[in-house]
Amino acid sequence: MELLREIDGYCERMGPGYWAEPVNAVTNVAFVIAAVWMWRRSVGVPMARALSLVLGVIGLGSYLFHTHAQVWSAIADVAPIAGFILLYIFAINRDVWGMRTVWALGATALFFPYAVLTVPLFQGLPVLGVSAGYVPVPVLILIYAGLLWRRAPALARGFVIGAVILLVSLTARSVDETLCAQLPLGTHFLWHILNGLMLGWMIEVYRRYVSSET
């Protein structure tokens, strides 16, 4: 793997320099703000605090990618996002569905075949097809919302709100390069801002549920 290979995938990047994407880099502060906010709100809810820590790492990884824009930093960008998704699924399986830890881990692992099967289907979508690797996530959130609607209606409604925010965020990510001529800055920075909001919100709805059950 060419870890130092340069990547130019966004409108704002016009060269290989460290600050070639200043807006895309700086807007990662949205993840950090959301992480700090949720850390403070999650006293007594260890899993919510763990998710808050991972959220902060997402901001750091994305910052590294938009300043260095190389293969290694792309991995640093994507890995914490995957970690957050898996940790969140595990938390819901264990703390909402009431699965034992081993069963919650097994059910969480099902995300991998789910993604493998659905990503190719989403690649043909208009607009969102370029973000097909992420589209399974809001779909899964909506599936969980439907399954939990009677069991935990407030949590399910929170999931729907989170899925809607994520779909708007994915749209901003997906149209970035297609709008370069009209918007040289691009729209990827909105992906950061909206995702910081969405991930913080997802931690909050989980925290509310766990707090209400104790």
Image: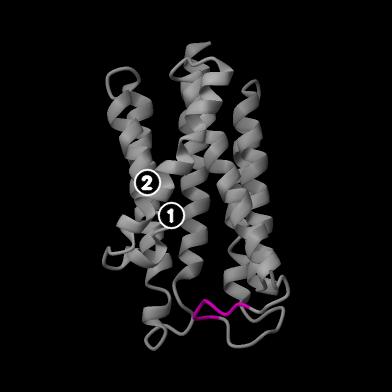
Q: Which residue is mark 2?
A: 138
Q: x%, y% of residue 80?
A: 63, 49
In this view of the protein, can residue 42 be seen by the observer?
no
> In screen coordinates, is 58 left or right of 169?
right
Q: Amino acid at mark 1?
A: Tyr
Q: x%, y% of residue 78?
A: 59, 56
| Label 1 residue SS | loop
Q: Main secondary structure of the magenta part?
A: loop
Q: Does the magenta run of residues contain 212?
A: no
Give yes or no for contact between labels 1 and 2 (Cβ–Cβ under 8 Å): yes
Residue 172's disc is none
Highlighted range, magenta: 7-12
Q: Which residue is mark 1?
A: 134
| Label 2 residue SS | helix
Is residue 122 depicted above or below 88 in this figure?
below
At x 57%, y 82%, the residue is: 13
